[in-house]
Image (cartoon, rainbow, N blue to C red):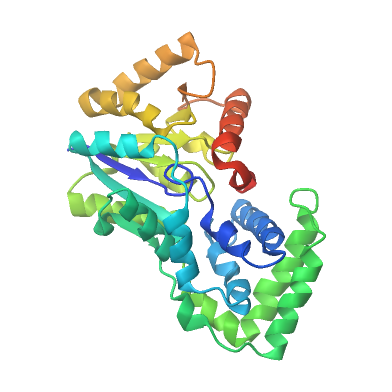
Amino acid sequence: MALICFDLEGPLAPQDNAYELMKLFPGGDKVFEVISRYDDLLTLEGKTDYEPGDTLALIVPFLVSHGIKEKDIVSLAETANLTPGVAELMAKLSSEKWQIFCISTSYEQYAFGITTRLGITRHHVRCTSFPLDQFVQELSSQELSLLQQLKTAISVLTPITDDSQIKEILDHFFWKELPQTNLGKLIKQVRPVGGQRKVEALNCFAQAEGKELSDWVAVGDSITDFKMLQAVDRAGGLAIAFNANEYALPYATIGLASTHLSDLWEVLEVWQKDKRSAVETRVKEREQKGSPGDRGNYHWLSGVTDFSLILQVHKKIRRLVRQEAAKLG
């Protein structure tokens, strides 16, 4: 029995759900871009009790203050584009009796909506529990004032260029001011499934299936996935970086930069029959031949120390497939 676990945003659907939610109110996209960069900075810093993807908890005050509801998340899942080639790959995996799983940082309303469309059974999905409608309440004048002050302060900041200011302003807001409010206490209930929590979820799936991580294929693309990819690669499984950024590539076994997810089938078929050593042979053969164009750009990553040229290819295809979301960590 072959087992594969996908991240959702990137491999299965190109949009970033939280980014799209924040766009539902004026200036929300800018706020999200800055907070998303803050998420990267906290992850790289190794902040205690913080996992990549906790952005989804940090944006809750803005969603609540602008009246965003769970139905809005459901609506986005119903209309979201799927990654080209994903339906074809799902059909092939199902016909070959693969067990398909998904571990996503996405809010549950979005993750279940997308995976249902793809035929992935709900008990094979782990995602972020998000009872947003329970959080909707009349905010105090203090809370509204704090949020407006923050929005004004970060509206002029640019990720990377203004990283030091982003860190200073958001550190003060999220860890000093917000915890003193009722809303700050509420959002502690939101625990996004990113980073180590993805590893824990995958271990739970592996235990339920009676399989070691060496038996798994994991597919991810960003900072929320790197610990899962690393765990699978170290165990001797197959960790695939699909149209990945610099935070995921170094932790994967192989990389695929392609406008179609269905291009994965070539190596998945090899893995199913002959496992990792055969995949290494196939991928290195593909690298030698070269893959001009926007499909089938395979790279063997295990043991690589310089990712600069590979990253250029992934960034190019990532922009084509994910568009605006490609700039997020």
- Tell me if 290 is positioned left or right of 262 in this view: right
Q: Residue furthest top?
A: 289
Question: Would residue 215 be visible to someone looking at this image?
Answer: no
Q: Is residue 208 above or below residue 324?
A: below
Q: Is residue 8 above or below residue 266?
A: below
- 149 vs 71, nearest the viewer: 71
x, y (%) of residue 78? 42, 57
Residue 41 found in image quarter:
bottom right
- Tell me if 106 is positioned left or right of 100 in this view: right
x, y (%) of residue 49? 52, 65
Residue 273 found in image quarter:
top left
Q: Quadrant of the N terminus?
A: top left
Which residue corresponds to the image point at 32% horizontal and 56% vertical from the top-left? 125
Q: Residue furthest front?
A: 79
Which residue corresponds to the image point at 48% horizontal and 59% vertical from the top-left? 76
Which residue corresponds to the image point at 80% horizontal and 48% vertical from the top-left? 161
Question: Would residue 36 be visible to someone looking at this image?
Answer: yes
Q: Is residue 186 above or below residue 299?
A: below
Q: How many marks?
A: 0
x, y (%) of residue 3? 25, 41
x, y (%) of residue 322? 56, 42
Which residue corresponds to the image point at 50% horizontal and 12% vertical from the top-left? 290
